Amino acid sequence: MKTVNDILEWLIQSGTLAAIVLFAWKFVKPWLDTKTSHASTEQAKVVWDLLEQVASISVAALVSQNMTGKDKFNLAVKNVQQAMRSHGFEINQAAAENAVQSAYEQSSLTPTVVPGNDSQPAQGTAVAIDPKEAK
């Protein structure tokens, strides 16, 4: 035991222990930085997944409401921000609006409207294809 104590005493007094710690820190610090970066990336993925789910639920809940589209959108954005805040995440207005817009576009419950085409043809009124033009 005295020998181990003498070795430790020598390492401390000679500064060798400090050199070993500094040398090890050079290798450990980048590894810790990588782990921290990876953890924050994983957390960001989870937050975005939660944001998408909350926006999708909010859009689905408001589809059948008797409100204008703008009012539904604003209410959905407000609901998304409140839900995320209740989970401990502060989401800015633009991110909430983008999530709601994306959820609206991906929802099978919302109608698809082609821009510039205000009227959809009635069923059975489509023009037949002329076989001469198909060649």
Image (cartoon, rainbow, N blue to C red):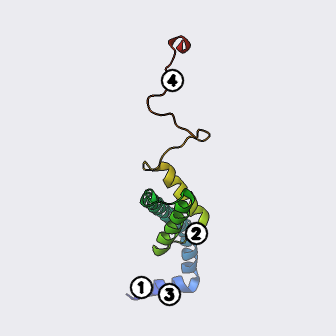
Nearer to us of marks 2 and 4 is: 4
Measure how far apart labels 2 and 1 are at the Cα level.
30 Å
Q: Which mark is residue 38?
A: none
Tell me if mark 4 has few (under 14), some (14-19) or many (20+) residues whose alpha carbon lies within 10 angstroms of its own: few
Question: Depth check: 99 or 64 in front?
Answer: 64
Q: Where residue 3 appears, x then y in whole percent?
A: 41, 85
Residue 105 located left or right of residue 109? right
Is residue 40 visible in the rendered image? The answer is: no
Per the image, the residue denoted by label 1 is: 3
The C terminus lies in quadrant: top right
Q: Where residue 11 appears, x then y in whole percent?
A: 52, 82
Measure how far apart labels 2 and 4 are at the Cα level.
74 Å
With respect to residue 61, does 113 lie above or below? above
- State the residue at coordinates (56%, 40%): 114
Q: Where residue 47 appears, x then y in whole percent?
A: 48, 64
Judged from the image, the secondary structure of the residue bearing numbered disc 3 is helix
Tell me if mark 2 has few (under 14), some (14-19) or many (20+) residues whose alpha carbon lies within 10 angstroms of its own: few
Per the image, the residue denoted by label 3 is: 9
With respect to residue 101, does 85 lie above or below? below
Per the image, the residue denoted by label 4 is: 127
Mark with earlier residue (3, 2): 3
Per the image, the residue denoted by label 2 is: 26
Q: Amino acid at mark 2?
A: Lys
Q: Amino acid at mark 4?
A: Val
Is residue 128 visible in the rendered image? The answer is: yes
Nearer to us of marks 3 and 4 is: 4
Question: Depth check: 76 or 42 in front?
Answer: 76
Tell me if mark 3 has few (under 14), some (14-19) or many (20+) residues whose alpha carbon lies within 10 angstroms of its own: few
Measure how far apart labels 3 and 2 are at the Cα level.
24 Å
Q: Amino acid at mark 1?
A: Thr
Q: Amino acid at mark 3?
A: Glu
Nearer to us of marks 3 and 2 is: 2
